[in-house]
Image: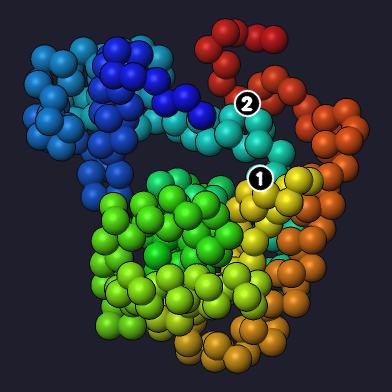
């Protein structure tokens, strides 16, 4: 992919996204000054960007405080609608949850992180807080390790060099040599198991999902807690269903690639289009 040069970058768009992404769990509402401090932009620039985003319907401001609107969710809807693998995996995630009683996810790599593009939570009051759009460090998650293990060499280098393999718990693998050894083991056995490296007591297992050409396009993962299962339990109870579902997703992708696209094109009902009704 051609990343272009600096002269190809439109700074106003770059700044607009910086302001949009300034709002998160730590800063759900913010003053103009807080957004300026978080983004490093000037207050006048932030003000113009917020007013533009407000006109487009992505933020709202009241009494000097700004926050995102539900319209932001449509960006994620458009991603799912234009990436068949995300929609296809949803039904398979439901089946995994029904068979295992544990939460299931489909994740993809974004730089040194994994992003959860699809998710079905188990029917329990307490979950681990992972939802669609959640970003987690790739080096300490089963999905991230699967994607690194079956990805290009530069993907692994970036995770190590740029991310630095920080210790999130006392169990997190932080040594680059040991991390590469773990990835080699994952390639050999075909799955990744992470026990307490992201969060104490958090246990997850993941397998690769391949497209019709054999390229790994994501990872299916199942997660639980040490209080409910041991590593041996999750390998025995969840791994067969993950492997079966990954093969089924690949078969569905193959069907799409050799037949007319089955996913409807264009904005779906309730999805925002900047170009008006289709």
The residue lying toward the viewer, choosing from 27 and 263, is 263
Is 62 rendered above or below residue 77? above
Identify the secondary structure beneath mark 1: helix
In the displayed structure image, the side of residue 38 where residue 99 appears, left or right: right
Residue drawn at the location 54% of the way across and 54% of the way down? 151
Q: In which quarter of the image is the C terminus?
A: top right
Q: Taking the image as drawn, is residue 170 in sight?
A: yes
Instruction: Report crowding for label 2: few under 14, some 14 to 19, many 20 or more residues within 10 A (C-alpha).
Output: few
Is 36 rendered above or below residue 174? above
Is 4 rendered above or below residue 199? above
Q: Where is residue 60 in the image (x, y as percent from the top left)?
A: 31, 24
Q: Where is residue 249 in the image (x, y as percent from the top left)?
A: 77, 54
Q: Position of residue 154 (x, y in %)?
A: 43, 50
Is 221 rendered above or below residue 1? below
- Image quadrant where residue 171 sits: bottom left
Looking at the image, is mark 2 or mark 1 nearer the viewer? Answer: 1
Q: Mark 1 points at which residue?
A: 86
- Image quadrant where residue 85 sits: top right
Q: Name the residue under label 2.
A: 270
């Amino acid at each position: 992919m051609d990343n272009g040069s600096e002269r190809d970058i439109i700074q106003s768009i770059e700044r607009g996204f910086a302001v949009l992404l300034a709002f998160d769990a730590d800063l759900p509402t913010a003053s103009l000054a807080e957004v300026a401090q978080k983004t490093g932009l000037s207050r006048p620039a932030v003000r113009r960007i917020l007013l533009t985003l407000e006109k487009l319907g992505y933020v709202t401001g009241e009494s000097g405080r700004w926050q995102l609107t539900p319209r932001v969710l449509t960006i994620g809807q458009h991603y799912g609608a234009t990436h068949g693998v995300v929609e296809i995996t949803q039904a398979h995630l439901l089946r995994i949850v029904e068979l295992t009683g544990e939460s299931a996810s489909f994740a993809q790599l974004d730089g040194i992180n994994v992003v959860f593009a699809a998710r079905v939570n188990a029917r329990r009051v307490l979950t681990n807080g992972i939802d669609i759009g959640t970003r987690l460090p790739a080096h300490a998650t089963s999905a991230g390790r699967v994607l690194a293990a079956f990805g290009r060499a530069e993907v692994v280098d970036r995770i190590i060099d740029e991310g630095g393999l920080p210790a999130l718990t006392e169990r997190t693998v932080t040594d680059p040599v040991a991390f590469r050894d773990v990835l080699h083991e994952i390639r050999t056995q075909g799955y990744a198991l992470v026990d307490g490296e992201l969060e104490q007591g958090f246990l997850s297992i993941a397998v690769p999902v391949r497209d019709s050409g054999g390229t790994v396009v994501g990872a299916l993962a199942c997660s639980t807690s040490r209080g409910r299962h041991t590593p041996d339990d999750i390998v025995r109870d969840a791994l067969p269903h993950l492997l079966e579902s990954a093969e089924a997703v690949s078969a569905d992708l193959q069907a799409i690639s050799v037949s007319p696209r089955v996913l409807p094109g264009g904005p779906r009902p309730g999805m925002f289009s900047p170009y008006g009704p289709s």
